[in-house]
Image (cartoon, grey):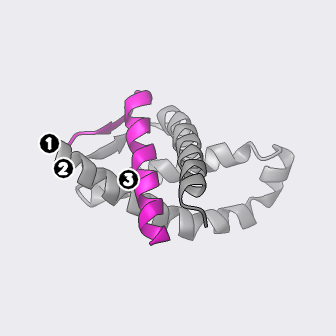
Amino acid sequence: MKIIIKILVVAAALWAATRLVDGITVSAQTPVKEIGTLLAVALVFGVVNAVLKPIIKTLGCAFYILTLGLFALVVNAGLLLLTSWIAKELSLPFHVEGFWPAFWGAIVIGLVSWILDLILDAIVGD
């Protein structure tokens, strides 16, 4: 059940990023297809983060330390760009234009996910 809730939270965060960041788009024709695309991209984004982020953190540990954690913003932008590429390969109408939209989008996704997680934890608990 927690995985489904997490996918819904990330999908909502992706939706917020498409609304707040120029260069992140979902070009679905109907609201139902847009929701389906956001859910599919949230699943892809979750898998990309679960598989690659721990490896990148381990290999790039020095960069995280030297930049006081700010390197994580670059990593998150890269993972969002990778998610966009995978979405294109899967014929999902989700696209991130380049590094800066990915950078700002990763920040929006992180903040919205964090806020929704806080709200859900307060309502549902662990």
Give the quarter of the figure containing the N terminus.
bottom left
State the residue at coordinates (61%, 50%). 118
User: Looking at the picture, which amino acid does disc 3 mark?
Assistant: Trp
* Residue 13 included in the magenta stretch of the image: yes
State the residue at coordinates (37%, 53%). 85
Label 3 sits on residue: 85
User: Looking at the picture, which amino acid does disc 2 mark?
Assistant: Lys
User: Looking at the picture, which amino acid does disc 1 mark?
Assistant: Thr
Q: Which one is earlier in the sequence, the residue at label 3 or at label 2?
A: 2
Residues in magenta, as a range: 1-28
Mark seen at residue 30: 1
Indicate left or right for 16 with 51 as reference. left
Label 2 sits on residue: 33
Q: Is residue 12 visible?
A: yes
Mark 1 nearby-residue class (10 Å; few <14, some 14–19, many ≥20): few
* Residue 65 included in the magenta stretch of the image: no
- Is 118 above or below relative to 26? below
**How many labels sit on residues?**
3
User: Going by the picture, which residue comes out furthest to the left?
Assistant: 29
User: Foreground mark, 3 or 2?
Assistant: 2
Indicate left or right for 110 with 20 as reference. right
Between 43 and 81, the residue placed more toward the observer is 43
Q: Position of residue 31 (x, y in %)?
A: 19, 42
Mark 2 nearby-residue class (10 Å; few <14, some 14–19, many ≥20): some
Q: CA distance from mark 1 to mark 3?
A: 22 Å
Q: Which one is earlier in the sequence, the residue at label 1 or at label 3?
A: 1
For the stretch drawn in magenta, what is the main secondary structure? helix
Q: CA distance from mark 2 to mark 1?
A: 5 Å
Circle 2/circle 1 CB separation < 8 Å: yes
Q: Position of residue 86 (x, y in %)?
A: 36, 58
